[in-house]
Image (spheres, rainbow, N blue to C red):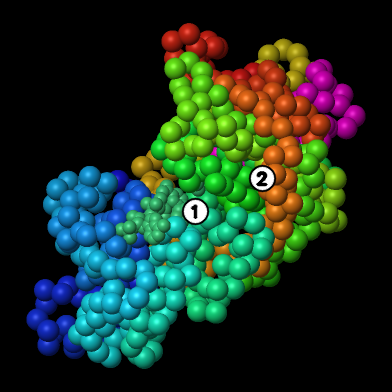
Amino acid sequence: MSEAVLVPQGSILLESELSAPLSERECWHCSVEKKLCLSIVVLGASGDLASKKTYPALQFLFRNGFLPHNVSIIGYARSPLTDHQLRDKLRPRLSGGEEERDAFLKHCTYVQGDYVGSQGWQGLEGVLSGREGKYHGCPCGRLYYLALPPSVYPQVCSGLKTYCDALPKTEGSWLRVIVEKPFGRDLSSSEELAEVLGQLYPESQLYRIDHYLGKEMAQNLFVMRFANMFLSPVWNRNCISNVQITFKEDFGTQGRGGYFDTFGIIRDVIQNHLTQLLAFVAMEKPLSIHPDDIRDEKVKVLRCIQPVQEHHVVLGQYTAADGQPGYTDDPTVPSGSKTPTFAAVTLFVDNDRWSGVPFVLKAGKALNDRKAEIRVQLRPTPHFVFGGNPERMRNELVVRLQPDEAIYLKMIVKRPGLETGDCAISELDLDYGKRYPGVVIPDAYPRLILDAIRGDQQHFVRRDELRAAWAIFTPLLHAVDEGRLPVHPYPYGSRGPPEADELLARAGFVQNLDYKWPHKAAAAASSPGGAGGNGNGARL
Ligand SMILES: NC(=O)C1=CN([C@@H]2O[C@H](COP(=O)(O)OP(=O)(O)OC[C@H]3O[C@@H](n4cnc5c(N)ncnc54)[C@H](OP(=O)(O)O)[C@@H]3O)[C@@H](O)[C@H]2O)C=CC1
Ligand SMILES: O=C1O[C@H](COP(=O)(O)O)[C@@H](O)[C@H](O)[C@H]1O
């Protein structure tokens, strides 16, 4: 593993080993301004997200030197677990050898407690303040990570505020709360939740996770857009014909059908993750990279989007195929459920830059591929004097978030050979695996947790952003909930309902039919029964 991107920054590497003698520790803590007594509380530590994402992300940060060596990670939940039982549950989810896992796990403890009443919270506060008391004079950081169903956020935040708020007054101390989506089911329920939390914690203490904001290419999209002169003049309705933002998974609900069925794909992926990506594509350049300047611009552009119209939507639900179960075969899904597992929606950004340009957001489970990408398709080149149909040979900029991060630009070039006027589509290709060999691209969760520890809210969703995003989808969601829109069946492992291709065609998307991204083509060529090719990876 290369350490190239993992150089810890001074602002968080702050504590001496607890094994140092107390007098030495006190002295050291107090003489170094940035020393921090960091406690991370994982609320809902017994749950799925905690063991799948939160603890592995914390271990990543710990292993790579981004957490103080004396960090305390306290799990809190109702389940009766001992420290040992929690560690045994987490161990298989962690990385590295036995020793590395244990080195991390010895920082993980567990407090059992309820989310109502006072007893559990008082127990937790006792553990926190007992620890902080040993570091008097030093700043203390408390990070409360709510890995819990949102239905309990109000009572949990109220318990934390009432009983677990006794942070030392030392300068530089802080308390932050991370919450996980879903933030409500529609505009009004989201506002209701925001109101309750807002009365307990100011916006500056609330960190709403949308893990797509923690992805390398989402962050890069923002940089790439505003750092490159050559993009600015074309990034508008004059040159861009349509934008597609796609999320595909090649597996179904995988045991999360109960959760999924109450939300559906629009709430699960489109209203949050894909809408955040849209905001990066469409926003204006912010005044600075201060988190609030960036989020101001995102809010502005989201507010330019009118609520989705029903004729701009295609919904689907996967059915059993090739031995794979259909959505309603999942025993946790109510029989006869009409919840969409696929949706394609076309949005329009009504401002000077984007008026009339369709943005198609498409997401589906149990499809033929697993990927997330942004595809910006340009208009045909006017007065095309070469061979070939310019309508079908479009410049496209593709940002691939996963798998295999890449950015490629489809170009029209001369086909190699003796004919000058003969054109083909090729690409300028930035493939991260090749360009940055051995560099670790950290997962979204460690990045976001580290941002929260550093107090950087840039990649967290602000309340007004959330409101603007819900406003776009709420009328549609109500129509879907009322069963007013058709839900087209599509076979597990397919491209989704054919109606979605028609929606894309209506949005002006033109597929460059004789083109395939070379990496994909190479994979197809080398697989049994693959597409073959000229062997040199060129797509000419
Ligand atoms: N799991 C995932 O892959 C993802 C989850 N999320 C979000 O993260 C959060 C946590 O998800 P996840 O870990 O899957 O959730 P779980 O259902 O596993 O719940 C986490 C813990 O919360 C407690 N809990 C569960 N239901 C209730 C309830 N009705 N009342 C009180 N406590 C309850 C349980 O702890 P105990 O009974 O021990 O107190 C449980 O272990 C949710 O907001 C979810 O939407 C977001 C993205 C992905
Ligand atoms: O938030 C969610 O995202 C995952 C997909 O995340 P990714 O990082 O693997 O792309 C999705 O499977 C899940 O349904 C949704 O809740």
**Residue 188 at what x, y percent from top left?**
66, 63
Task: Single out the residue that lies furthest toward the left.
Answer: 21
Magenta-drawn stretch contains 392: yes
Cβ at disc 1 under 8 Å from ligand 2: yes
Q: Residue at x 72, y 58 (%)?
A: 471
Relative to 142, does residue 314 appear above or below in the rendering? above
Name the front one of labels 2 and 1: 2
User: Which of 299 and 414 lies nearest the eye of the viewer?
Assistant: 299
Indicate whether residue 494 is drawn in magenta: no
Q: Earlier in the sequence, mark 2 or mark 1?
A: 1
Residue 481 numbered mark, or none: 2
Which class describes the residues within 10 Å of circle 1: few (<14), some (14-19), or many (20+)?
some
Residue kind at label 2, given as amino acid type: Asp
Q: Could you say where residue 67 lies in the image, as x and y percent from the top left?
A: 30, 66
Q: Residue at x 53, y 55 (%)?
A: 182
Task: Tell me the tag on residue 211.
Answer: 1
What residue type is disc 1 on?
Answer: His
Instruction: Determine the CA span between mark 2 and mark 1.
Output: 26 Å
Element carrying mark 2:
helix
Residue at 50% x, 79% y: name it: 200
Please provide percent x and percent y for residue 221: 60, 50
- Image quarter hosting the C terminus: top right
Q: Is residue 539 above or below residue 530?
A: below
Residue 10 on image: x %, y %: 35, 72
Which segment is the magenta one?
372-394
Indicate the secondary structure of the residue bearing disc 1: helix
The residue closer to the viewer here, 484 or 173, is 484
- Specify whether tag 2 is near ligand 2 (CB below 8 Å): no
Q: Quadrant of residue 70?
A: bottom left
